[in-house]
Image (cartoon, rainbow, N blue to C red):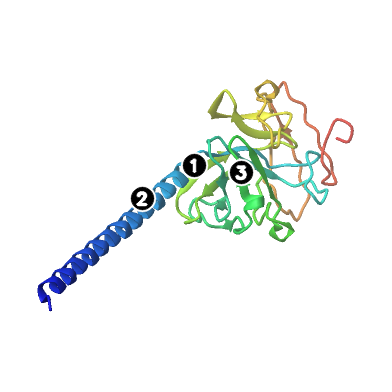
Amino acid sequence: MDHGSNDEQRSAKIVMNTNFMRLGVLILCSWIWGSCLFIAHSASDSRADRSKLKINEILASNINDVKDEYNEDEDWVELYNEGEAAVDVGGMYFSDDPKKLSKFQIPTGMSRHTNIPPGEYKLFWFDGEPKEGPYHVSLKLSRKGEALLLTGSDGQTLIDSVRFPLQRNDISYGRDPKDTDRWLYFKNTTPLQPNNAEETANNVAKDPVYSHEEGFYGSPFELSLSAPSDATIYYTLDGADTDKKTG
C-alpha cells in the first residue's frame, strides 16, 4: 500500500482548500469594501445634491393668485433643484424659527410627490393644514416678513434660508434669475416656472405710518396716516382689502 501517495493527495487537497478559502475571503473583503465605498460615495453625492436645492420664490399674501388643489388662495413656497441629479425632499424640514429648525417635516415614503428632478420646481402650500396632502405645510407665512429655513432630514443641517421683508398682496418675492444671490419683488408670480426678471416690482411702496399703535382702545381718538409724497393711501373701515374702487 502506497501511504506516501495518499499523504501527498491529502496535502494537495488541504492546500487547494486553503487557497479557495483565501480567495473567498479576498472576494468577500473586496465586496464589503466596494459596498462601503459605494455607500460613502452615495451619501456624499446625496449631500452634494441637497446643496443644489434652493428656496426660489415665495408668496406670503395670496389674495387672488394661483390656487391649491382645493381651489383656495394659500401662501406658497417654491423650491428649485439647480443640480444635475434628482433630490427627494421627503424627511426635510421647514421652519420659520432659526432656533427651532425642525418645526415641520416634509412627509417621507412619498417620493412620487417629494422627488424634484434636476432643473425642476416643487410648490408647497403654507396654509397650516398638513392633512390636506404632502404639499401642505403646518406653518404659515407672515405678511410682515420673517425667516424661512429649509433643513436636512437630521433637523440640523441648513440647506437654504431667506429672511424676507414686508410683503404685498399677490406680489411674490424671489431670486433674480440673473443673480441668484439677489432677491426681488415680482408683480407677476411664476410658480413652477423660472422667475421673470422683466416683471419685477421693486418700486413697491412702504407701508403708511400710523399715529397710534394697533390694538384695542376704550375711548375715541383721532388717527392720522402718512406716506411718501408720491404714494396714495387707500383704506376701509370694515377690515376688507383695499383697492382703488373700495378705499
**Which of the two discs, 1 and 2, sits closer to the camera?**
2
Residue at which label 1 appears: 49
Under circle 2, the secondary element is helix
User: Would residue 65 appear left or right of 12 to someone viewing this image?
Assistant: right
| Sequence-earlier tag: 3 or 2 | 2
User: Would residue 68 appear left or right of 192 to someone viewing this image?
Assistant: right
On the image, the x and y values in percent for residue 67 come to: 79, 44
Q: State how far apart marks 1 and 2 are (Cα).
A: 18 Å
Question: Neighbour class for label 2 at 10 Å: few (<14), some, many (≥20)?
Answer: few
Identified at 44% across, 48% down, the residue is 42
Q: State how far apart marks 1 and 3 are (Cα).
A: 11 Å
As displayed, is residue 16 above or below residue 119? below
Residue at which label 2 appears: 37
Amino acid at circle 2 = Leu
Q: Nearer the viewer, residue 94 or 170?
A: 94
Residue projecting furthest to the right: 245
Identified at 84% across, 33% down, the residue is 243
Quadrant the C terminus occupies: top right
Residue projecting furthest to the front: 1
| Sequence-earlier tag: 1 or 2 | 2
Residue at which label 3 appears: 116
On the image, the x and y values in percent for residue 181 come to: 52, 30
